[in-house]
Amino acid sequence: MKATGIVVEYNPFHNGHLYHLNQSRSKTNSDVIVAVMSGNFLQRGEPALVDKWARAKMAVSAGVDLVIELPYAFATAQASDFAKGAILLLDSLKCEFFCFGSEEGSLDSFHHTYDLLSTNKADYNTAISTLMKQGISYPRALNEAYKMISSDSTVPLVDLSKPNNILGYHYIEAAYQLNASIKPETIHRVIANYHDDAEASQTIASATGIRKVLFGEMDLTSIQSYLPNTSITELHAWHSAFNAFGSWESFWISLRYIILRHTKEQLANYAEVTEGMENAIWDAAMKCNSFQSFMQQIKSKRFTWTRIQRMLTHIYIGFTWNELKQMDLPTYIRPLAMSRNGQAYLNSLKKDLQLPLISRVAAHKENEMLMLDLKAANLYYLGLQSTFAQKMIGSDYRNAPIIL
């Protein structure tokens, strides 16, 4: 069986994801689609709309064959580490291809860009360091340094100001650096860009735009044209049970409590909290009654909104700099959901897997990376502030993979 891997968050699974899924299967002529998916906290440093089990079920209901969890340490990391964790897992699962959406839509420019940056690595890093000392954000410094390095290039290069191009570049970089067997493919992203608002006349919108509409109107009928019926059904079931969707606004009471029970010095021990941000975070938590007002208080030119949210995620979970430094690569494969086709594929690999396959976690309490995932799951349910969610605390320890 030929397998193609994709890296996803599905927050929630929408028509654009369905297009990517179908195009990935068609372009690579694969029998199996394996998705490595973030857990309950996401790369942009925020709680998922619904938990990983609900999102994995949406994915398999729409045609994904196997959904594997990307551990918290990588799911909430900067793009290069996010990509490294995901590509290693897909390669470990013997996927022949990985297929990502991009604004570029062509692979050659990604390979040219990797060659350029790896050849000029010292100059590139020096330029980034110089620019950051001028007080600009890391992503902007990357982009400006890239423009400097690439100004004399005579081959087509990727526009690294585009969010999906950036992730695509890091996927290819990770495959090179891991010396992985898996081969890249890309699909041109259609209609909606990563941060675009949803438009009523379209059937494809970004997940960001969909969430914005949902939180604005709190009515699932307002987003149903952008999602497959299977996703709408799952969201209805979720809201009926939990009466809440995940967001930092709904988590604010818990997050604020956690910030204020620490000293400023203690906050600096958490991953990605740097350059005095512990002071701004603590001071704003003392004053602000909502997450939105809190973020408006601490945002700056030096740190992007996403970077600050990742700091807050690590504070909320209790993930320290020391733990981050110890978690270089994923140490297990944990299936969340699968079709019968995906189950057959996974069974065919069991004897050849180099990482342990974990379906039930009880026998793996010594695995610190896995225990971190379980802690993140419990704190996710706690943050939802609903009666049913409180009953879900501890459920991640007992859950077995969903088979549809």
Image (cartoon, grey):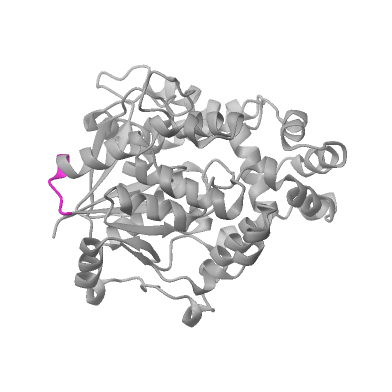
Q: Residue at x 78, y 30 (%)?
A: 297
Q: Quadrant of residue 116?
A: top left
Q: Which residues are magenta?
A: 27-31
Q: Position of residue 319 (x, y in %)?
A: 64, 58
Tell me which secondary structure the magenta stretch mostly adopts. loop
Observer-nearest residue: 31 or 297?
31
Q: Quadrant of residue 298?
A: top right
Does 339 sit left or right of 259 as displayed?
A: left
Does 385 sit left or right of 20 as displayed?
A: right
Q: Position of residue 6 (x, y in %)?
A: 31, 47
Q: Is residue 52 rendered magenta in the image?
A: no
Q: Is residue 28 rendered magenta in the image?
A: yes
Vertical position of residue 143 compared to residue 233: above or below: above
Vertical position of residue 286 compared to residue 123: above or below: below
Observer-nearest residue: 297 or 92?
297
Q: Quadrant of residue 341?
A: bottom left
Q: Quadrant of the C terminus?
A: bottom left
Q: Quadrant of the N terminus?
A: bottom left
Q: Residue at x 54, y 45 (%)?
A: 49
Q: Is residue 226 visible?
A: yes
List the single residue furthest toward the bottom. 363
Q: Position of residue 393 (x, y in %)?
A: 62, 66
Q: Is residue 177 visible?
A: no
Does 193 sit left or right of 390 as displayed?
A: left
Count of picture labels = 0
Q: Residue at x 59, y 26 (%)?
A: 131
Q: Residue at x 15, y 44 (%)?
A: 28
Vertical position of residue 67 compared to residue 303: above or below: below
Vertical position of residue 198 compared to residue 255: above or below: above
Q: Position of residue 226 (x, y in %)?
A: 39, 31
